[in-house]
Image (tube, helix red, strand yellow):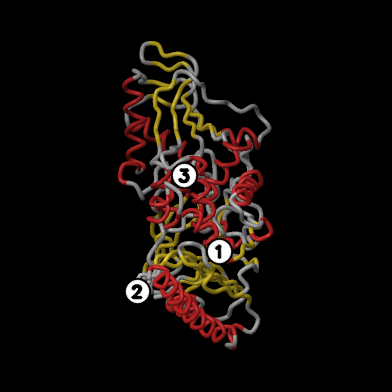
Amino acid sequence: MKKAFAVLTLSSQLIFAQNTASKLEAATKSLMNSSTAVASNLSFYVTDESGNLIYEYQGNKGLSTASTQKIFTAAAALETLGKDYTYTTTSSYSGSVSDGVLNGNLFISSNGDPTLGSWRYEAYKPESFKQKLLDALKKSGIKKISGDLVIDDSYFDFQTIPGGWPWDDLGNYYGAGVWSVNWRENQFDININGKEFKSFSYPLEGVQWVNELKTGGSSDQSLIFTAPHSRVALINGTLPSGKTVTVSGSTPNPPLQLGVEAGQWLKNAGIDFSGKIITNSQLQIEGKKILEAPKNNIILTYQSPTLDKIVYWFLRKSVNLYGETLIKTLGKEKKGNSSFKSGVAYLKEFWKSKGINGNMINFADGSGLSPQNYVSAKAEVQALLYAKKQPWFSSYYEGFPVQDNGMKMKSGTMRDTKSYAGYHTSKDGKKYVFSIIINNYQGSGSSELQKILNTLK
């Protein structure tokens, strides 16, 4: 009797899977036969929670992923670094302190904390770091600094932007570079009315603007162009007339920005400081010897939120800065080399060791912003299935957003690219793991792909 029941159950499951596959096939073919998909490529792969294939359409085909690339980076970081991993920012000094006078330089250094001064975490906003630094100086008895304020941004290598990122993206907030010392997520906001700058979220240090904005249309169609270390920023495109719009850009020199702000904190707090603001990246540009932060005389150790909290926002709000910081951190921790190339190589090695075909995971960065990422839907599902079995899965899963159709999945969007990857439990209790990626599609993308995925509901 038990054997007969098992056979009946298995037969029911097979029939159900076949029905689901038929519906997915019909929906997929309907999309791919449409006029907007005539030149498109699609990779689609669906399994149950045990990894049994339900349906695939060119599941092995490598396509540009956009931000579903983040599922690989987040999982590898959680396993490699651990969900309790934290970044550390320190303040220390050279020389000595006598009668309240620091006869030397004050240093601020970090190993790449991407959350330093972030608004996303209540206890880690700019005011928090400012107050802790001033409290540390007070506790150390420092009332005057005879030397300079040095921002030691030498932990990572000099390159702040992954190769292959489009120039159009670099000046916008989502194209912010990665530094050893990051500040305010390397982002600034401008309130603009028509073509006129009304206010900045904070004074942006050392930047001259070329404003070529025009008015017209009903939405923000502006672009900001800045480059790392640049002192010139261009904004062009169009903004609606007659109303104030907030446009967000990427800070061209976050270490310098922090240094200038910290120098002002000192003066406002009554600490006598008239020295220079120095960054090691600028010394490197000038061919001068860098000034490494002393390992002793540490007056402040400032820990970031734990990695599980960082991964939450990385996935939930698709923060590219976090992904590229994790890539540099993985390269530094596992290969002793913080270059993007090294970190990306480790990411590929990690997933190959988990059984994913290396030809299906051609990574170019950690966030998916580069159109040079090529990944298959099958590889994304394999990564999701692997993560589901790990002790850190709850931290990973929590970061996946719930999309407009009610499904919990990471989305990816770039020009002519749309993707989704995630997990779903249907109304009758069936659990699915899936990835769908479309390239060179001339429709809206989001609604069409969600319509296909709604078959799983």
The secondary structure type at the circle numbered 3 is: loop
Image x and y of residue 364, in percent: 64, 55
Q: Residue at x 43, y 17 (%)?
A: 102
User: Residue 338, labelled with which disc?
Assistant: none
Q: How many marks?
A: 3
Label 2 and label 3: CA atoms lie apart by 42 Å
Front-lying residue, 74 or 233: 74
Front-lying residue, 439 or 209: 439
Image x and y of residue 10, in percent: 45, 72
Front-lying residue, 36 or 271: 36
In the image, is 409 to the left or to the right of 367? left
Q: Residue at x 54, y 69 (%)?
A: 53
- Disc 1: CA contacts within 10 A as few (<14), some (14-19) or many (>=20): many
For the question of whether residue 210 can be seen, the reply is no
For the question of whether residue 318 can be seen, the reply is yes
Question: What residue sits right under mark 2 in the picture?
Answer: 428
The secondary structure type at the circle numbered 2 is: loop
- Disc 2: CA contacts within 10 A as few (<14), some (14-19) or many (>=20): few
The secondary structure type at the circle numbered 1 is: helix
Question: What residue sits right under mark 3 in the picture?
Answer: 114
Image x and y of residue 92, in percent: 45, 23
Question: What residue sits right under mark 1 in the picture?
Answer: 66
Locate the C terminus by quadrant: bottom left
Q: Nearer the viewer, mark 1 or mark 2?
A: 2
Locate the N terminus by quadrant: bottom left
Residue type, label 2: Asp
